[in-house]
Image (tube, coloured by chain):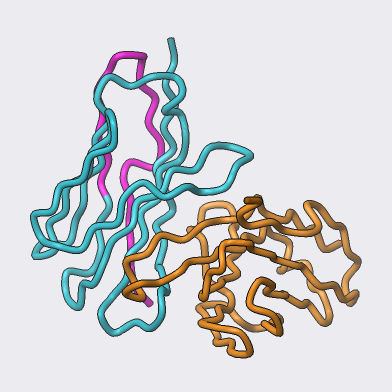
Chain colours: A cyan, B orange
Amino acid sequence: ILNVEQSPQSLHVQEGDSTNFTCSFPSSNFYALHWYRWETAKSPEALFVMTLNGDEKKKGRISATLNTKEGYSYLYIKGSQPEDSATYLCAFIGSTGTASKLTFGTGTRLQVTL
Amino acid sequence: NAGVTQTPKFRVLKTGQSMTLLCAQDMNHEYMYWYRQDPGMGLRLIHYSVGEGTTAKGEVPDGYNVSRLKKQNFLLGLESAAPSQTSVYFCASSYPRTGVTDTQYFGPGTRLTVL
């Protein structure tokens, strides 16, 4: 069973704060890492797919970095807004896996208040 | 484009009853998946399909069966529901160019309660 861990479990920040969270995954047999954003009462939506060590992806105020050698990825949100409130999931795919089988972490729940 | 849709949205069953959850996608995706979401746990893969007529077991397949008779539909069946199957079920699909780097598109979920 693959161990994908996310920290912190939850985070409460004020509007304008920048924040980051961590996804830890097995460093051996890495193939890809996905980040998803999941708003309450909606479906998870894809943010990034990362495959290369040192990769950095950006979408607006959200960015992510990847370190496959040490087995972690950071997700950063710059200048948090209330609409950023959601659970952020990471999902790992190992090279020994098949198809597109993702192993999800339990998520970091972010709440941004005014 | 409706994307990924799930039917029903909510359902309450008694222990031992059977039901089928329907997932439909209109994006011509090859791969489809069924997950369950339980409190304190990540999304866990139940079964998946890499194409019409093919299915495979995921992480937690026991107590479920699936069928993919048409490319656009993926059915999840519970033959004899148990309280441990109370969960929120999500369907997803992807059109893999490389197999593992394509994002999955999720449906809105089905909340199932087994009494």
Residue B65 visible within the image: no
Q: Is residue B48 left or right of residue B109?
A: left
Q: Where in the figure is residue A66, as x and y percent of width and height?
A: 16, 54
Q: Is residue B35 left or right of residue B14?
A: left
Residue at position x 17%, y 75% in the image: A28
Q: Where in the figure is residue B106, as x and y percent of width and height?
A: 56, 56
Q: Quadrant of residue A69?
A: bottom left
Q: Is residue A13 magenta?
A: yes
Residue at position x 28%, y 34% in the image: A62
Q: Is residue B12 magenta?
A: no
Q: Tell me: residue B86, above or below residue B33.
A: above
Q: Tell me: residue B97, above or below residue B104.
A: below
Q: Quadrant of residue B88?
A: bottom right
Residue at position x 28%, y 84% in the image: A96
Q: Which residues are magenta?
A: A1-22
Q: Is residue B83 left or right of residue B18?
A: left
Q: Quadrant of residue A53?
A: bottom left
Q: Tell me: residue B98, above or below residue B86.
A: below
Residue B99 visible within the image: yes
Q: Where in the figure is residue B72, as x and y percent of width and height?
A: 65, 71
The C terminus of chain A - image quarter: top left
Q: Is residue A93 left or right of residue B86?
A: left
Taking depth in this image into account, of B45 and A7 the one nearest to the observer is B45
The N terminus of chain A - image quarter: bottom left
Residue at position x 63%, y 90% in the image: B53
Taking depth in this image into account, of B78 and A63 the one nearest to the observer is A63
Q: Where in the figure is residue A38, as x and y percent of width and height?
A: 49, 43
Taking depth in this image into account, of B103 and A109 the one nearest to the observer is B103
